[in-house]
């Protein structure tokens, strides 16, 4: 597996509380380029909160987030997405009234045609770009196996297909870092296997992925490193074998305290 | 000959209004009741320019467009902050503000008396005084405006608008800045409505505050919803329908006193019927008819 040694994402001493609840407490970790890292832990451990802070949906009470060496702590979500971070959601947030192809097309970055003045000023350039974007979108759909459904409304897809569309959007974004929030949730065993193979495939091509997952089979199958969170702090860090082999961590995860 | 041309001229003006409002309501999903305010501002800008600066009609259209584009961008500032249901209230406030200025700024707008004597168009010596010339000019402008709206809607800009409408947080997660898109759509749609207003001013040659009330905003809502939001063509058909309808009602032997109320009742009835029976509006009917025709010709080919 390719393993670039550069640090792509650096989370430094993040803290976040909601009212009286400390969701994240002085959390620090790094994600290296080309690696696949999973965040695991019991519910309420702060995993999704970490994702929300990194992707800009939430601002931390203290601490910093650095991406490719630059601070992104204070940026808006759309700015962070443009910098190269693709964040998926547990509730998917697909554009249900648009077709599969449109969902992926709109995810392509840097479209000149999104500027109204360019729409009227340089229509030929936009036409040429649209052709390129369509090809890129179709490539993404081919990877996730949705090419034959490109004209179907996203709302008419099955749950498993919608989850694959979410990945297609991330591929089309050409984001350097993927934050996948429970990609296997709600899927049956066959679809989970499909999702795992998909993630492994893109990881094999060098994609840096950070996962939040409850399905430990998925975590074991795709991750090189596992970060175990509990009550907002990082309890342990290691390979899947090290983490899942640890009896104390298993107890915390399963709640046998 | 005069009567149908008058209807054509009205269709041109309201077609631009309906199509530009579709960009706001249908594509961006912004529930704004302020569109009539831009119609009014455009009319007043053109009237004032014509009366005080004696500028030619086409220039007045441009001035109206620019003024309303800026006004639209300004409306976007509070509108974007509040979003959702509160946008209705914010746009309502904007309408009231504009109406109050029209009604009370006597020095400029002459209040309820309005501005009269607006010059009729003269395009490089081509005097537009007769209905056929008005119809030709206004139809040409309408075609241009509708084509521009269509171009915007079909572009990546329009696609991003729809994404923001469908799921704003999802759109942000793929790098779309909602403030940018919403500001632009208010500015562009406002500019088009301003052009329609300027056309109105140069046709009726009189503008008054009571021509630009909430009733007009509601009428535009009806045009877009009956036509089918987010299709451009639908709202255009909605404009045609709702311009022709009051004229048709006139032929129903309804006493003049009752024509206003009957018109409102018919609008209401139409809205209810359409929502229940054809939720995809006039566009849906057109689409189904075309599909039916295609099926029939395919069947004829296979059987023949």
Image (tube, coloured by chain):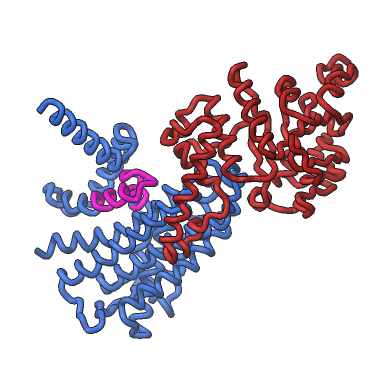
Residue furthest top in the image: A256
Main SS, magenta region, reads helix
Q: Is residue A232 visible?
A: yes
- Residue B203 in magenta? no
Chain identifier, red in the render: A
Magenta region:
B220-242
Q: Which quarter of the picture shows residue B15?
A: bottom left
The answer to whether B220 is drawn above or below residue A238 in the figure is below
- Residue B56 at x, y = what percent? 31, 81
Towards the viewer: B241 or B176: B176
Residue furthest front in the image: A1
Towards the viewer: B281 or B53: B281
The answer to whether B121 is drawn above or below residue A26 in the figure is below
How many numbered badges does the structure rendering display? 0
Viewed as shown, does residue B1 lie left or right of B275?
left
Q: Say which quadrant the C terminus of chain B sits in.
A: top left
Residue at image coords 34%, 43%: B228
Towards the viewer: A17 or A149: A149
Chain identifier, blue in the render: B
Towards the viewer: A220 or A80: A220
Viewed as shown, does residue B274 lie left or right of A56?
left
- Residue A70 at x, y = what percent? 77, 54
Viewed as shown, does residue B233 lie left or right of B85?
left
Residue at image coords 22%, 63%: B9
- Residue A241 at x, y = what percent? 83, 22
- Residue B230 in magenta? yes
- Residue A209 at x, y = what percent? 71, 37
């Amino acid at each position: 597996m390719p393993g670039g040694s550069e640090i792509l994402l650096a989370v430094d001493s993040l803290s976040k509380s909601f009212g009286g609840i400390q969701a994240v407490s002085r959390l620090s970790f790094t994600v290296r380029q080309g690696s696949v890292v999973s965040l695991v832990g019991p519910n309420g451990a702060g995993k999704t909160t970490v994702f929300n802070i990194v992707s800009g949906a939430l601002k931390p009470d203290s601490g910093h987030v650095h991406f490719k060496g630059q601070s992104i702590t204070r940026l808006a979500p759309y700015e962070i997405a443009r910098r190269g971070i693709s964040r998926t959601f547990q509730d998917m947030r697909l554009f249900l009234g648009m077709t599969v192809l449109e969902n992926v097309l709109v995810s392509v970055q840097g479209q000149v045609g999104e500027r109204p003045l360019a729409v009227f000023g340089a229509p030929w350039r936009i036409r040429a770009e649209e052709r390129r974007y369509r090809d890129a979108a179709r490539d993404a759909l081919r990877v996730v196996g949705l090419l034959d459904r490109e004209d179907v409304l996203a709302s008419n897809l099955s749950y498993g297909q919608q989850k694959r569309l979410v990945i297609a959007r991330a591929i089309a974004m050409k984001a350097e870092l993927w934050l996948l929030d429970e990609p296997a949730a709600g899927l049956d065993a066959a679809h989970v296997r499909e999702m795992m193979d998909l993630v492994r495939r893109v990881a094999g091509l060098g994609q840096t992925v950070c996962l939040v997952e409850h399905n430990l089979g998925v975590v074991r199958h795709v991750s090189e490193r596992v970060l175990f969170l509990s009550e907002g702090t990082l309890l342990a860090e290691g390979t899947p074998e090290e983490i899942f082999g640890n009896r104390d961590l298993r107890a915390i995860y399963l709640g046998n305290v | 000959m005069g009567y149908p041309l008058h209807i054509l001229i009205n269709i041109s003006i309201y077609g631009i209004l309906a199509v530009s409002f579709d960009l706001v309501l249908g594509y961006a999903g912004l529930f704004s009741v302020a569109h009539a305010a831009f119609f009014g501002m455009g009319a007043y800008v053109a009237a004032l320019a014509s009366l005080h600066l004696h500028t030619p009609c086409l220039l007045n259209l441009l001035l109206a467009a620019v003024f309303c584009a800026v006004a639209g961008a300004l409306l976007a500032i509070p509108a974007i902050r509040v979003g959702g249901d509160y946008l209705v209230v914010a746009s309502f406030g904007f309408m009231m503000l504009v109406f109050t200025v029209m009604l009370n700024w006597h020095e400029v707008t002459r209040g309820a008396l309005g501005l009269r004597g607006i010059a009729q168009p003269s395009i490089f010596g081509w005097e537009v005084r007769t209905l056929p010339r008005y119809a030709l000019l206004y139809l040409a402008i309408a075609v241009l405006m509708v084509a521009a709206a269509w171009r915007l809607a079909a572009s990546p800009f329009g696609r991003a608008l729809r994404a923001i409408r469908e799921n704003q947080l999802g759109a942000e997660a793929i790098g779309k800045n909602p403030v940018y898109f919403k500001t632009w759509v208010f500015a562009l749609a406002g500019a088009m409505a301003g052009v329609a207003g300027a056309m109105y001013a140069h046709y009726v040659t009189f503008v008054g505050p009571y021509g630009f009330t909430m009733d007009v905003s509601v009428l535009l809502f009806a045009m877009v919803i009956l036509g089918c939001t987010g299709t451009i063509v639908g709202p255009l058909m909605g404009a045609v329908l709702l311009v022709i309808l009051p004229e048709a009602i006139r032929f129903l032997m309804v006493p003049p006193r009752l024509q206003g109320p009957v018109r409102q009742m018919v609008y209401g009835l139409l809205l209810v019927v359409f929502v229940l029976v054809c939720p995809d509006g006039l566009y849906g009917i057109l689409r189904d008819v075309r599909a039916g025709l295609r099926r029939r010709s395919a069947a004829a080919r296979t059987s023949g």
